[in-house]
Amino acid sequence: MLRKIRLTFAVLFFLAVTALFLDFTGTVHAWLGWTAKIQFLPALLALNAGVVVALVLLTLLVGRVYCSVICPLGVMQDIVSWISGRRKKKRYRFSYSPEKKWLRYGVLVLFIVAMVAGIGSFVALLAPYSSYGRIASNLFAPIYRWGNNLLAYFAERADSYVFYETEVWMRSLPTFIIAVLTLVVLAVLAWRNGRTYCNTICPVGTVLGFFSRFSLFRITIDESKCNRCGLCSRKCKAACIDGKEHRVDYSRCVACMDCIDTCNHGAIGFRMRTKASEKKTGKDAKPKAESDQIDTARRSFLSATAVLAATSVVKAQEKKVDGGLAVIEDKKIPVRATPIVPPGAWSARHFAQHCTACQLCVSACPNNVLRPSTDLQKLMQPEMSYERGYCRPECTRCSDVCPAGAIRPITIEEKSSTRIGHAVWIRKNCIPLTDGVECGNCARHCPSGAILMVPSDSEDVNSVRIPVVNAERCIGCGACENLCPARPFSAIYVEGHTMHSVM
């Protein structure tokens, strides 16, 4: 019964989070956006103390239920492992293996150091929610949109417009390759060994595993009923049950309840922890050397957690102070001295420190403005570019969906007055000067009135007009860059601001 309840909630959470990355209408986020905001690392980076405390208390109560129910990457691995287990000869393919403390805590320390040092690309590679987000947005979302476009094609021929066609394009080749490699590696590990990644590499799993050691309710083995058949060990995808010794490693147990349904003698149950169940005698007692190792590991973990908490406090303070048939040539991305980050990010530094590169804002952006960065230091973190659209002042979708606080919620009024960059005019590319014809596209479409067309020759009022940019009025939305007819480079482009300001 417990296993069925766990599976039901796991499927619901998995479908809800996946729908966030597939949705291009914005309707799903209004109802299910909270499922992204209760993910552990985004909540921690957003300084959402309520969610973090709730997840820790949940773990102290019933163990690592988060990993088997709420985390989409964990559920995805369970799906792959379940498919592998459907093979007749592989139904009981697991075996108990000792915990690799040096690897788990070593990766956690490196993860925390990367967070403190601002190495966002390393953090994004290891974060479980971010890893699944990249897989969903780069691999699942295109398939979903192609299916939508196929339905739109047939609906249009039936004079129905229930569906509408959307653009499918590759936003970043490096991020796509990383998403593919991540999926392949995780799928292979889950296919062969179940939860190997969660119990050796995943930093969130290591943190919650530490608290899970002290959970109130846990998997227990009744020695009087157990005949040491070992089926529980061979069914445990976390490799944490030593059936012959009646021992469970609670730091790695994800409370999947598979072992309960597997035991034919009713020896395994999910019960409240008691002193009797904790008492170890004889060969079940831990050797003194092993006990000392555990104490050392605990001290190391607490030290690393203290560093992480201190870093979060520092970041909190930073947040407070800081027509025709001719073929049209595609635009090329200009070389920007300063990348552009979305309104609501406050500053490039704040954005880089809080963004987990989950790609949720990239998937949700209706204007095709956001795409993953190819800069190694900020690899996979979104940045703005205006070849396929511009950041419309009335759109706040990215700030609405960001679960990590990298893009704070912002109103339409605030966005319209926030300067994220300024337009720069390139004289040699401007059509009025190169072709001798009137244009003015940039001035006509500027929503803030920051561009004025003036005579190119100050002594001849009838000379062709060229744009002049008022940098104080420019908000950096990119309408001028996107709608400029010059090819392959626009005659006007946007330079980003490291620190946003308000007009």
Image (cartoon, rainbow, N blue to C red):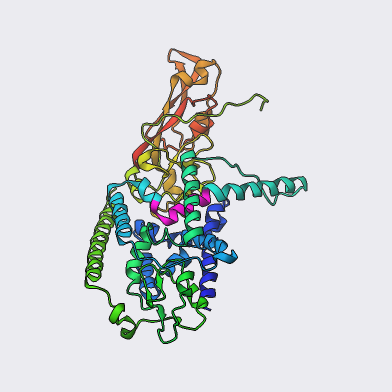
Q: Quadrant of the C terminus?
A: top left
At which x and y percent is residue 251?
Answer: 35, 68
Q: Is residue 384 above or below residue 414?
A: above
Q: Is residue 450 visible from the viewing direction of this image? A: yes
Q: Is residue 222 left or right of residue 309?
A: right
Q: Nearer the viewer, residue 98 or 310?
A: 98
At which x and y percent is residue 60?
Answer: 35, 73
Q: In the image, is residue 14 part of the stretch drawn in magenta? A: no
Q: Is residue 360 visible from the viewing direction of this image? A: no
Q: In the image, is residue 128 part of the stretch drawn in magenta? A: yes
Number of numbered discs present? 0
At which x and y percent is residue 225?
Answer: 44, 86
Report the magenta stretch's main SS. helix
Q: Is residue 421 left or right of residue 81?
A: left
At which x and y percent is residue 295?
Answer: 23, 68
Q: Which residues are magenta?
A: 126-137
Which residue is pictured at 47% across the width and 56% down the height?
189
Q: Nearer the viewer, residue 171 or 28?
A: 171
**Which quadrant of the view contains residue 341?**
top left
**Which quadrant of the view contains residue 323?**
top right
Q: Is residue 338 above or below residue 309?
A: above
Q: Residue furthest bottom?
A: 224
Q: Is residue 73 left or right of residue 162?
A: left
**Which quadrant of the view contains residue 106?**
bottom left
Which residue is pictured at 71% across the width and 45% down the height?
153
Q: Nearer the viewer, residue 257 or 173?
A: 257
Q: Is residue 223 above or below residue 350?
A: below
Q: Nearer the viewer, residue 189 or 254?
A: 189
